[in-house]
Amino acid sequence: MSVEFHNVVKRYGEATAVAGISFTVEAGTLVTLLGPSGCGKTTTLRMIAGLELPNEGRISIAGRDVTTLGATQRDVSMVFQSYALFPHMNVLENVCYGLRRSGQSREDAARHAREGLRQVGLESYEQRQPSELSGGQQQRVAVARALVLKPSVLLFDEPLSNLDARLRRQMREEIRELQLRLGLTVVYVTHDQQEAMAVSDRIIVMNAGRIEQQGSPRDLYERPATPFLARFMGESNPARGLLRRLGPETVRVRLGACEIDVANANAADGEATVAIRPEAIAVERPENGDTNSLAGTIARASYLGTHMEYSIDTAAGLLFATCPRVERPLAVGDPVALQLAPRGVIVVES
């Protein structure tokens, strides 16, 4: 079922948490609300759930106006950041809880709860207490408890923030696989850009209560519309360069002695701010570079096992770059010639 926001505003006293946002979550898709702390993403999720009501605007779910309806009238389920499992109940009882509250018999609730546990791979854990489960298993119980209510929309509020890095990767894959297999409509909140890119059909980036930009993960990473988004979606190096338009869709960017042609339909000739992705910078020794390179000097070097990280002084500013070659690392003070890949150079402000 779809979710639609129409010019929704939420205030707390004099403070505006959400400032007139509009968007649509299409049925059967996973859309992530992404942004830094305090941007309004969790408030937006809570308004979908009916835990907060807007001061202005309209919210609809499956074409039905739910703006003034409470949480129990909206046919949505929410998986909280803390999982909110009852410590005195076993796994089966936790999953049965919402079903029993909705009026199902003990036998029907247990049957549906076991099916929910089977869907998340925990059918043999029904008699365990929450304290006997790992963080990932607790999260799956919380998902099963939400799924058995057969909601029109499933909501996730920072569901992986309490897990370590390896388990976060595993669980985000499981959430995505479950969403695709069951055809669920999911709204997902996180502040982690990689997590959002890994699970989402579409991402809505919020900043200071407003929507900064929305689109597919590739669109937002490769074509950020604002300097904030270029900085926020992955690593990027801000630099000043000179632009010269070559055609309707292409501009030439000059950074020091280096010129590179990039796709852009809007920028005008003159000085501009560009974002350079670290992975788009090839770090070469001067003898391996050609004349169309950006000269620099290694200012910092860090070994990270799988790759090197370098900070490099250049005429375009201090640039951060990654390099997969760890067998012959460069040292602080070494001269380098930087080659820039067009795909990783983005004009963000002219």
Image (cartoon, rainbow, N blue to C red):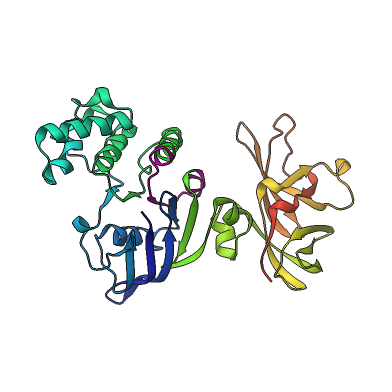
Say whether residue 320 is magenta. no
Q: Is residue 261 above or below residue 266?
A: above
Residue nearest the viewer, comparing 77 with 192:
77
Name the side, left or right, on which 212 lies relative to 309. Answer: left
| Residue sitting farthest toward the front | 63
Q: Quadrant of the N terminus?
A: bottom left
Residue nearest the viewer, comparing 349 with 285:
349
Q: Quadrant of residue 240?
A: bottom right
Q: Is residue 197 above or below residue 251?
A: above
Q: Quadrant of residue 256?
A: bottom right
Q: x, y (%) of residue 136?
A: 34, 33
Q: x, y (%) of residue 63?
A: 34, 62
Q: x, y (%) of residue 302?
A: 63, 39
Identify the residue at image location x=77%, y=68%: 248
Q: x, y (%) of residue 17?
A: 35, 68
Identify the residue at image location x=74%, y=38%: 330
Identify the residue at image location x=45%, y=55%: 34
Region in magenta: 179-198
Is any part of residue 134 visible from this angle?
A: no
Identify the residue at image location x=27%, y=64%: 66
